[in-house]
Amino acid sequence: MTELKPRKTLFNPEVKRRGIYLLPNMFTTAALFAGFFAIVQAMQGDFERAAMAIFIAMVLDGLDGRVARLTNTQSAFGAEYDSLSDMVSFGVAPALVAYEWALRDLGRIGWIAAFIYCVGAALRLARFNTTLEVMDKRFFQGLPSPAAAALVAGLVWVMIVAGVPGGDVRWIACLLTVLAGVTMISNIRYYSFKDVNLKKSVPFFSIAAIALVFALVAYSQEIALFAFFVGYCLSGYILAAVGLLKRKPV
């Protein structure tokens, strides 16, 4: 007569409960909250706070992965949760902020431009998740969604501080929003900074450049951030153009 084995139920102590790591997911949740807060502030007409919240989400999004690697708490759940958080913070939030701030005045063209950005962010994140194991870690394929969000939020922040209404620069906002959305799904490569080693020695010029950056940030945070991400966006196009010029005709 065969011996009956006890069934594995939720109340059986032999069943090991699966949990999630708290520390990295706390940063992801905070980034998601910042993105949601940006949406709420845009709906209430406080676009400066909305833009600042997107930048805060970008900082928190950069921390969660590093915290997970440092504490050895990476998980499939954390990766999926981070991707969903990015879609809200760097996909939906910037599109809605841009639309409420300037693109609404363009009517149908405005919401189409916002949708192009939103779907570009969704496709960018989906492609990143499916090509993570085969892509070159030194480069991103297409503009990263946090950088694209910083482009849109940076324009909003700079114009508000300068006292320029969104309606006066609605076409510039439209073109920048579409450019950010299209660049996210392009094949243009962008440097990822993942191979930077802080333990290695650097030229003296590097320290001077860092000091200059700190001075610019101290003078005007919004201009410094917007200028950096405009330069980062253009860097991919410049490298692509240089690569095309170096190719020899067959």
Image (cartoon, rainbow, N blue to C red):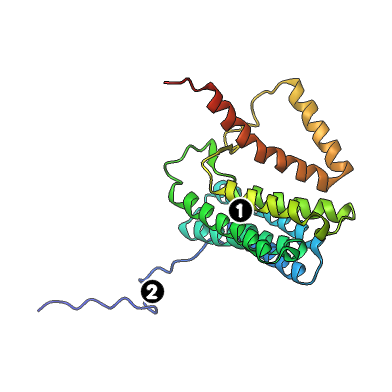
- Specify whether 181 is left or right of 7: right
Residue 205 found in image quarter = top right
Query: Could you say where residue 69 lies in the image, as x and y percent from the top left?
Result: 55, 47
Secondary structure beneath label 2: loop
Q: Which residue lies under the disc numbered 1?
A: 64
Nearest to the observer: residue 213 or residue 183: 183
Camera-side mark, 1 or 2: 1
Query: Could you say where residue 159 lies in the image, as x and y percent from the top left?
Result: 83, 53
Residue at image location 87% in from the left, 42% down from the top: 218
Q: Among all residues in the image, which is located at the extreme left?
A: 1
Which quadrant holds the N terminus? bottom left
Mark seen at residue 13: 2
Query: Could you say where residue 64 lies in the image, as x and y percent from the top left?
Result: 61, 53
Query: Could you say where residue 147 lies in the image, as x and y percent from the top left?
Result: 65, 47
Is residue 138 placed above or below 99 in the rendered structure?
above
Which quadrant holds the C terminus? top left
* Mark 1–mark 2 CB contact (< 8 Å): no
Nearest to the observer: residue 182 or residue 214: 182
Nearest to the observer: residue 39 or residue 218: 39
Residue at image location 51% in from the left, 63% down from the top: 20
Residue 143 found in image quarter = top right
Distance CA(mark 1)–CA(mark 2) = 32 Å
Mark seen at residue 222: none
Callout 1, which amino acid?
Asp
Residue at image location 64% in from the left, 49% down from the top: 180
Q: Could one spot residue 63 in this view of the protein? A: no
Residue at image location 54% in from the left, 61% down from the top: 81
Callout 2, which amino acid?
Pro
Secondary structure beneath label 1: helix
Q: Could one spot residue 111 in this view of the protein? A: yes
Nearest to the observer: residue 26 or residue 53: 53
